């Protein structure tokens, strides 16, 4: 049931059974975030292979991004836009958090959203065939694993309730350790030592971004979890591509 709760929260994929969700049970489903990422990754990887037979490269990669957005409902992209709006649009923690909660998108958020999508398209279209499937499958796994780290190791920034408060309250080091096995094992199976190296370097590269957010608002929110996910995914695609180009 924990997997189904995580699936219903992180995606818009149909679940043909009734899933009871409360704050505690949803928070304890964090362990399954990388598992959901793996499902997303394999769906995208298989669709990418199939679309490669009938679509030109540019259209194929735009199609991949659109399907990805449809699967997730743009949840993390929305978090990225709200986070950047808040951090660059406010001068105090309270103002930043207020801007993040505003449903309207500002200039900074729009720039961040456009830049993230453009960079993701550029990374997808530049992936060589020999590592393309591995990169597409692994990116959603690693990004959601790093999101678990943001939940486990940083406090909740808002006072009172919020959509990310339960995660911060009920997720700890033990949950992060448990969630780490899947990314490590799948990375090794799909890409051997190159995959493990990419996982480690991506995690290290994501730490400054998480620390920067924490320095601004003294913790994390539901929006910043989404921002961490998007940033981690882009970082992994960059790191994995560089490693395979330089070392392989």
Image (cartoon, rainbow, N blue to C red):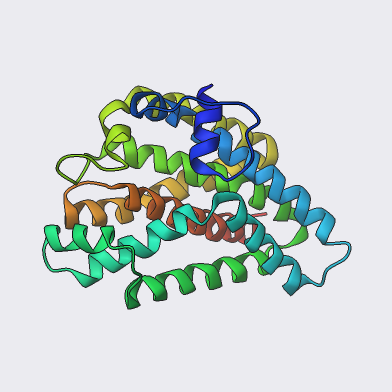
Q: Classify residue 112 as left or right of residue 123.
A: left
Task: Tell me residue 201's x, y (percent).
Answer: 46, 49
**Image location (x, y in percent) of residue 87:** 24, 65
x then y, percent, for residue 77: 46, 59
Res 184 visible = yes
Q: Viewer-proximal residue, 227 or 192? A: 227
The correct choice, above or below, for 53 with respect to 174 in the image is: below
Residue 99 found in image quarter = bottom left
Which one is in front, 244 or 45?
45
Residue 108 placement, left or right of 177: left
Counting the numbered discs, the total is 0
Q: In the rendered image, which quarter is residue 84 located in?
A: bottom left
Residue 40 position within the rendered picture, expressed as x and y whole percent measured from the top left = 63, 44
In depth, the one of 4 and 143 nearer the eye is 4
Who's the residue at 81% across and 72% down the image?
56
Q: Is residue 188 above or below residue 68?
A: above
- Residue farthest right in this picture: 53
> Residue at image x 24%, y 70%?
88
**Residue shown at 68%/54% (left/top)?**
248
Seen from this angle, which residue lies furthest front?
A: 18
Where does the N terminus fall, quadrant-wise?
A: top right
Q: Is residue 205 visible?
A: no
87 in relation to 169, above or below: below
Q: Residue at x 83, y 68 (%)?
A: 55
């Amino acid at each position: 049931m924990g997997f189904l709760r995580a699936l219903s929260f992180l995606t818009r994929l149909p679940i043909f059974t009734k899933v009871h969700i409360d704050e505690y049970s949803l928070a304890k489903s964090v362990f399954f975030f990388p598992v959901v990422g793996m499902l997303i990754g394999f769906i995208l990887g298989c669709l990418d292979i199939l679309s490669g037979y009938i679509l030109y490269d540019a259209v194929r990669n735009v199609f991949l991004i659109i399907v990805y957005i449809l699967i997730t409902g743009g949840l993390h992209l929305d978090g990225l836009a709200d986070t950047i709006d808040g951090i660059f649009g406010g001068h105090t923690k309270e103002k930043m958090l207020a801007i993040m909660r505003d449903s309207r998108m500002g200039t900074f958020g729009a720039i961040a959203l456009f830049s993230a999508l453009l960079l993701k398209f550029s990374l997808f279209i530049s992936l060589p065939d020999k590592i393309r499937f591995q990169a597409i499958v692994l990116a959603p796994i690693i990004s959601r694993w790093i999101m678990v780290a943001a939940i486990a190791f940083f406090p909740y920034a808002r006072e009172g309730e919020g959509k990310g408060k339960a995660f911060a309250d009920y997720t700890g080091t033990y949950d992060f350790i448990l969630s780490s096995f899947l990314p490590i094992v799948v990375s090794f199976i799909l890409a051997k030592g190159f995959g493990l190296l990419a996982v480690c370097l991506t995690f290290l590269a994501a730490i400054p971004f998480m620390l920067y957010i924490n320095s601004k608002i003294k913790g994390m929110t539901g929006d910043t979890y989404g921002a961490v996910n998007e940033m981690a995914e882009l970082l992994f695609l960059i790191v994995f591509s560089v490693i395979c180009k330089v070392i392989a």
